Amino acid sequence: MAVQLQGETRFSRRAVKVDEAIRLVVEATEPGRHEKVPLWETNGRYLAEPLVATTDWPPFARSGLDGFAVRSADTAQASPSEPVTLRVVDTARAGELASAAVEPGTAVRIMTGGAVPLGADAVVMLEQTVDAIVDGRPAVRVKRAAEPGQNIAPRGEEFRRGSVLAEPGTKLRPGHVALLGTFGCADVPVFARPRVAVLATGGELLPVEAPLEPGRIRDSNSAMVAALVQQSGGVPLLLGRVPDEPEAAARAIAAALAQCDIIITTGGVSVGDYDVMASLLAGLATAAPSGSHLREAAAPSAFAAPSGSHLREAPAPSAAAAPSGSHLREAPAPSAAAAPSGSHLREASAPSAFAAPSGSHLREASAPSAATELPPGSRLLFNKAAMRPGSPTSAAVVGGKLLLALSGNPGACFVGFELFAGPALRRLQGASAAEALPRQATAKLAVSFAKGSPHERFVRARLHTDGGVLYADPLAFGKSSMMASIPDADCLIRLKPGSIGAEAGAIVDVILL
């Protein structure tokens, strides 16, 4: 089968600023499916529905410590030199109710968390009392006057029945787990983990377990992306490798749409003759509506830190046959006439995808077949980002779902995931648009770093502190095609556009990984 090429449009792709590209990706995604999970599995998940208190809390007046429940009026004259003696009529253990009320001149021994008995309006701590026997009966000598309400948590002090415990979009933490358990939330409604189809393109790719062959390499990107998906809370679906043929890629994407919430591809996005994803997206690029969502002006920063933190805030098989030798799973392909039901991405009308660019020099003389068309409403978000590494990174909405086409170079693939896929996955899981953005801080540059490209540069680096100052140290082997520095990177230094770079000691923005 002849390969459909990109044509002249490969050299006229418009670079979108990184902040704008992130904004487009986040705006194209919305929180998705709901599910209920056991309470103990909710840590790190995002709440899908509001949860309210099912009772007042505390549900009864309870003691804040071990001591004696008393009438405060009975202790008004108490002092260390002249303690007040009260007769002990009962003991209130946690989980039990006292059988006797506190009458004038009496007290009830009470444990932490115990229900305060009727008649008592204060609890005297054990250390301010002395045990005694009066007329052969147990008593207590109180050495300090008690104030009304002392050491008592009144009913409803923390929550009233019906008050909101957590709103939708709340990222649940262990403290929330304790709170929800208190009110009997055994199964909690959360946003489902996004199902992420991972597809690798390139005829040069071999399975990881295969021996190397001349001119070929193993597909390590798919496993890396799958690990990053898991780290980001998603569920990866590794759907294998796709040949450098647009029709085969379109079929693989159609099959993936039937089983996933988002598609991530690696490779095939540059300007080479056989860059299949770029060839497919070229049709979308030329068909984008005039006055589209792509902004010409510089966008405000898309990165934000959590409120109150030290981080600074800133603005398989398809309807057609699967490719021979493919590892795609068997699944019916979605209809080309409609987006899958339950889609979570915003729809926008757009001409049918994958029409050949006007005036292009594609080898195919006839119009592209139906196998290279995507569902109506598919639209390009961007097909080039003003960044290094990974400038050919592309994004589109296909059949109502986000497709991210990342670079095949490992370093660029890693950076592209952190900048674009991470935010999209957080948003799909219920994070707000602001919370979904990469977290950014500032640090001192440990060593000087030169850059030749005028585009914004994202440098893999390691953070360390010295004298209370945070430093970012660029790692060696930082080129787009290199992977040796990926395991050690815990941040990306964000160097501003321009060809100068930055000197050692300069304050730089860093994206926390």
Image: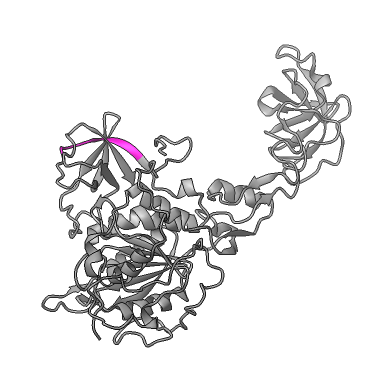
Q: Residue at the right extreme?
A: 103
Q: Position of residue 137 (x, y in %)?
A: 83, 31
Q: Is residue 175 visible?
A: yes
Q: Nearer the viewer, residue 121 or 305?
A: 305
Please state the extent of the stretch shown in magenta in the rendering: 441-448
Identify the main secondary structure in magenta: strand
Q: Is residue 208 left or right of residue 153?
A: left
Whether 328 is drawn above or below 388: the answer is below
**In x, y percent, where is residue 302?**
40, 45
Q: Is residue 270 in view? A: no
At a point 30% along the width and 30% down the height, the residue shown is 468
**Numbered marks: total:** 0
Using residue 165 as the reference point, say whether residue 2 is left or right of it. left
Judge from the rendering whether residue 400 lies leftward or rightward of residue 149; answer left or right. left
Q: In which quadrant of the rendered view does residue 151 lie?
A: top right
Q: How is this picture coloured?
A: one colour
Q: Position of residue 482 (x, y in %)?
A: 18, 58
317 is higher (above) or lower (below) than 159 = below
Q: Residue furthest left?
A: 214
Q: Is residue 169 magenta?
A: no
| Nearer-the-camera pick, 403 or 468 | 403
Is residue 445 part of the magenta span, yes or no? Answer: yes
Residue 120 x, y percent position in the rendering: 82, 30
Q: Can you say which quadrant of the picture contains the N terminus?
A: bottom left
- Please state if 422 lies on the left or on the right of 54 as rendered: left
Residue in the foreground of this view, choosing between 66 and 447: 447
Up-down: is 470 above or below 366?
above
